[in-house]
Image (tube, grey):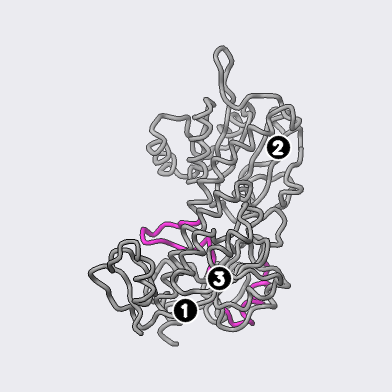
Amino acid sequence: MLNYIDKDMGDIGKSASQYFAINQTGLMPKEELLEIGKGQKSMSFGIPREHEKGENRIPLTPQGVELLTANGHEIVIESGAGNGANYFDHDFSEAGAKIVDNHEEPFRCDVVLKVAPPNEEERQLFSPGQLLISLLHIFKQDRESIQQLMHKKINALAYEFLKDESNCYPVIRSMSEIEGYTAIMIASEYLSKEKNGKGVLLGGITGISPAEVVVIGAGTAGEFAVRAALGLGCQVKVFDNSYRNLRELERNVGQRLFTSVLHPQVLSKALKSADAVISSLRYFDPQSRFFISEEQIAGMKPGSIIVDLSMGNGGCFDAGCSSKSHGSAVTIQHGVIHYRVHNIASRVARTASIALSNIFAPVLLRLAMSGGVSQLIKQDLGVSHGLYLYKGILTNHTLGERFNLPSKDIGLLMAAF
């Protein structure tokens, strides 16, 4: 029996009888059915439970699972994988997923979807030809972990490198929007006396000077932190090393702000009066690594707070702290509260999981329709850009330079295979 696709509904991979059953409420099939391309195949997708502390997100929601299973694909989910986002086993099983109790079974699927990068134990579970889709967290990786994946001869796609049809980074943008809003919520929480803060309301009321918020970085996270702070009535100052980014932020927000490029003297003055500092600068000079010195932090008001959104990229503050998990994210140095964590979006795991599912469910459908990753990267430049391993060969030059590993251009590789 031929497989068909309904051009109007976009219902993929259904036989004619399946299609009629779905639409039996109307009692009539659609007028036009098109034959699906021969490349399409049924695939299996595995989602293991995350073991990284503080990571509560899951890459597919039950709605995303239902979309894939309705198109003939198998979803294998480890029991409890969605608990952190308040999606439970029965939610996924009702959507058509297979729930398993062991951690290894999802790693036997064609595609393994994770949020956190695989740990050493998980890297041993891969087989040649599989596709791994996860965050990379380049500053948390080491040479040995990349080499282990290379030796497994797998394909690997990083959330951070994936592009969409408009040449943007959809995962980075979506998570940055969430992190920008969440950073202001965190700052508000830790300025309260309950958290040993100054007891300051992050905002402004009649007759009282508004709290001051400094945002370092005028990218997506910075923009949404600014939006949230302005909504609370804060006085906001924004710094960035790009005049163009500052101008675009003002245009997007729709009002004039205090903006400045990163002049050390201007920034130091702003830090001294700030109640909260949000660092969202993701593109720093790798030679100096830090933008904000410990001396500048020591000059800040006691009880003020720093929320560093750049921990996944090494951090922006020189305060002697390394990347921390949620369990030990908060420290106090020079009387200033530091909140440093690389997965802040996981605090609102359900919202973040929905955002991830909205991005990856269509990508996985395209993957199956094309017949596999080798065909998809020929058709989709955004996915090709996100791939950092192809059949065990490193295809990302940034990783190659960082870890002194040989890398090859994906276009040349595809021509060779």
Q: Nearer the viewer, mark 2 or mark 1?
A: 1
Answer yes or no: is residue 289 visible: no
Where is mark 3, residue-wise? Answer: 75
Query: Does residue 247 sit above or below 301 in this rendering?
Result: below
> To which residue does mark 1 refer?
42
Q: Nearer the viewer, residue 31 or 53?
A: 31
In the image, farthest residue toward the bottom: 417
Indicate the position of residue 174 as horizontal and vertical percent values.
Answer: 49, 51
**Residue 374 left/right relative to 400:** left
Q: Position of residue 26 (x, y in %)?
A: 30, 62
Say if mark 2 contacts mark 3, CB within 8 Å.
no
Query: Relative to residue 377, is residue 192 depicted above or below?
Result: above
- The kind of residue on which mark 1 rests is Ser
Q: Which mark is residue 295?
A: 2
Where disc 1 sits, the SS reads loop
Residue extent of the magenta highlight: 142-171
Drawn side of residue 62 relative to residue 119, left or right? left
Q: Residue at x 36, y 68 (%)?
A: 11
Q: Position of residue 344 (x, y in %)?
A: 62, 48
